[in-house]
Amino acid sequence: MATYNSNIWNLKLDSAQHETTTVFGKVAIPAGTSVTSSDTLNLFRARSGTAVVSFWLYTNQWATTAGEGVVGHYATATGTAIDEDSISVDVDAEDAGLTMSFADALATPFLPVSQDYFVAVNVGTITDPVSAGEKYLLFGAVLARPGDTVTSVYTWNGEASGSLSDE
């Protein structure tokens, strides 16, 4: 079991309140090396309060046959899965191509959590791995920070104005 980090792994990503941040990265597996069952591909780390609202993966061929892996987000402090948001998905290691997106693989995006977290792929069963040439996983994600709740400040003609709760 090997662990590979993306080119943006050393960053801790954040998003300003009510704004989004788009991230792109790559995990490279060197030529002559095979992706094997239970390998971990660490994609990115993010601060508490952010939500992953869009996500996609793209790979080249890693194997001739492969089983499903898990894409999920995990608590940075403990490494444990935030289970309701960790999903099984075919990372399409046997073919090159778009592997997953929230549009076709998830009903909802990763919701905001109250702790720092990281997003990783845990590779499923790999048989007949490919060792020739560099293997890669490209990924993109949109992070958002929903911000504080809106509270009523005053009512005028039946219309309430709103303000962030920390204003």
Image: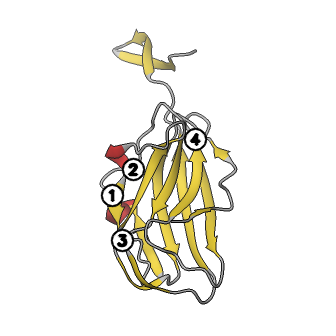
Q: For the C terminus, which image quadrant?
A: top right
**Residue under label 4:** 19
* Label 3 close to label 1 by CB (< 8 Å): no
Question: What whole-number distance in Å separates the C-alpha atoms at marks 2 and 4?
Answer: 16 Å
Question: What whole-number distance in Å separates the C-alpha atoms at marks 1 and 4?
Answer: 22 Å
Instruction: Compare marks 3 and 1 and give the one earlier in the sequence.
Output: 3
Question: What whole-number distance in Å separates the C-alpha atoms at marks 3 and 1?
Answer: 12 Å
Looking at the image, residue 67 sits to the left or right of residue 139; the answer is left
Asked if residue 149 can be seen in this view, the reply is yes
**Residue under label 3:** 90
Instruction: Compare marks 2 and 4 and give the one earlier in the sequence.
Output: 4
SS category of the residue bearing label 2: loop
SS category of the residue bearing label 4: loop
- Count the marks: 4
Q: Residue at x 34, y 70 (%)?
A: 68
Q: Residue at x 60, y 54 (%)?
A: 22
Instruction: Compare marks 4 and 3 and give the one earlier in the sequence.
Output: 4
Looking at the image, residue 162 sits to the left or right of residue 68; the answer is right
Which quadrant holds residue 17? top right
SS category of the residue bearing label 1: loop
Instruction: Residue 130: give x, y in percent of width and height.
Output: 51, 87
Q: Amino acid at mark 4?
A: Glu
Question: What whole-number distance in Å separates the C-alpha atoms at marks 1 and 2?
Answer: 7 Å
Q: Residues within 10 Å of mark 1 (few under 14, many from 20)?
A: some
* Label 1 close to label 2 by CB (< 8 Å): yes
**Residue under label 2:** 109
Q: Amino acid at mark 3?
A: Asp
